[in-house]
Amino acid sequence: LIKTTKEIYTLPLPVHRLDKETGGLVVFAKTKSVSAILSEAFKNRLIEKTYRAVVFGDISIESLENVENLSDEGAFKIISPVGGKEATTHCRIVSKHSYRSPKRQRGDPNGDTIGKSQIITKVELKPKTGRTHQLRKHMKLIGFPILGDKRYGGTEVFECGDRRLHLYAVRLRFDHPTNGSPIEVAVTEPQYFP
């Protein structure tokens, strides 16, 4: 009886994971069989994942290296290996924002002038492969690290004064594991995003 009950009533099982500091949507399965089906769908790249991120700098597609322009305006594709394996990320510029750094200017004789104005860019990222830290590595590769990225960003990723990683899983699209109907789940990015 206990074995049968355990098979029927399992705790929700996470089907995939996010990096430790990344927030957003995660899929859980109610049963082991559904978990196996969804895990296989992730492995075979049948689940479309969308993230929002805020990066340091003013992205200009024309000046980027290691990217391929896509047909949508403000969209490009990054193709570069991650961990020795093929990795592709689609990226679209969502908006650009100006902020004044809370850091004091060097050489300010009065010591009370707040730092210079900076540009940050909000982007939508769609990994076509699922490598560890793929989005963070790709954004660093093209010279636009994600704000708050302690591992792949430089000191500039903390200049806006917010130390949180600005990377958030906002949308998942996949087919229902048993009846095949399309499912789309979406959330908005956190309020601390510009």
Image (spheres, rainbow, N blue to C red):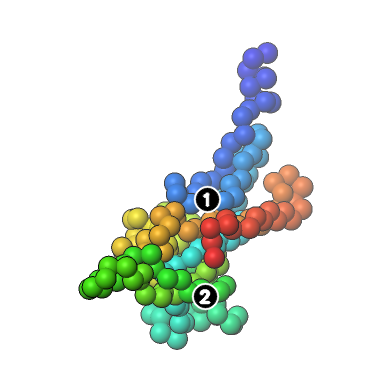
> In front here: 181 or 20?
20
Question: On the rendered image, what quadrant is the N terminus found in?
Answer: top right
Q: Amino acid at mark 2?
A: Lys
Query: Which residue sits at x=45%, y=82%?
Result: 60
> In front here: 67 or 152?
152
> In front here: 78 or 120?
120
Number of numbered labels in the structure image: 2
Eyeballing the image, is 109 above or below 187?
Answer: below
Element type at marker 2? strand
Eyeballing the image, is 71 above or below 131?
Answer: below
Eyeballing the image, is 115 above or below 47?
Answer: below
Residue 100 visible in the displayed image: yes
Residue 185 position in % (x across, y down): 68, 53
Residue with the most extreme top position: 1
Q: Residues within 10 Å of mark 2 (few under 14, many from 20)?
A: some
Query: Which residue sits at x=48%, y=51%?
Result: 22
Question: On the rendered image, what quadrant is the C terminus found in?
Answer: bottom right
- Mark 1 and mark 2: Cα distance apart in space: 21 Å
Q: Quadrant of residue 142?
A: bottom left
Which numbered marker is on residue 96?
A: 2
Residue with the most extreme front position: 110
Q: Which residue is mark 1?
A: 23
Residue 34 position in % (x across, y down): 65, 40
Element type at marker 1? strand
Which marked residue is nearer to the observer: mark 1 or mark 2?
Answer: 2
Residue 99 position in % (x across, y down): 46, 71
Q: Residues within 10 Å of mark 1 (few under 14, many from 20)?
A: some
Query: Which residue sits at x=44%, y=67%?
Result: 55
Residue 84 visible in the displayed image: no
Looking at marks 1 and 2 on the same chain, the residue that comes earlier in the sequence is marked by 1
Query: Which residue sits at x=57%, y=43%?
Result: 15
Q: Please give left or right for residue 161 compared with residue 104 in the image.
A: right
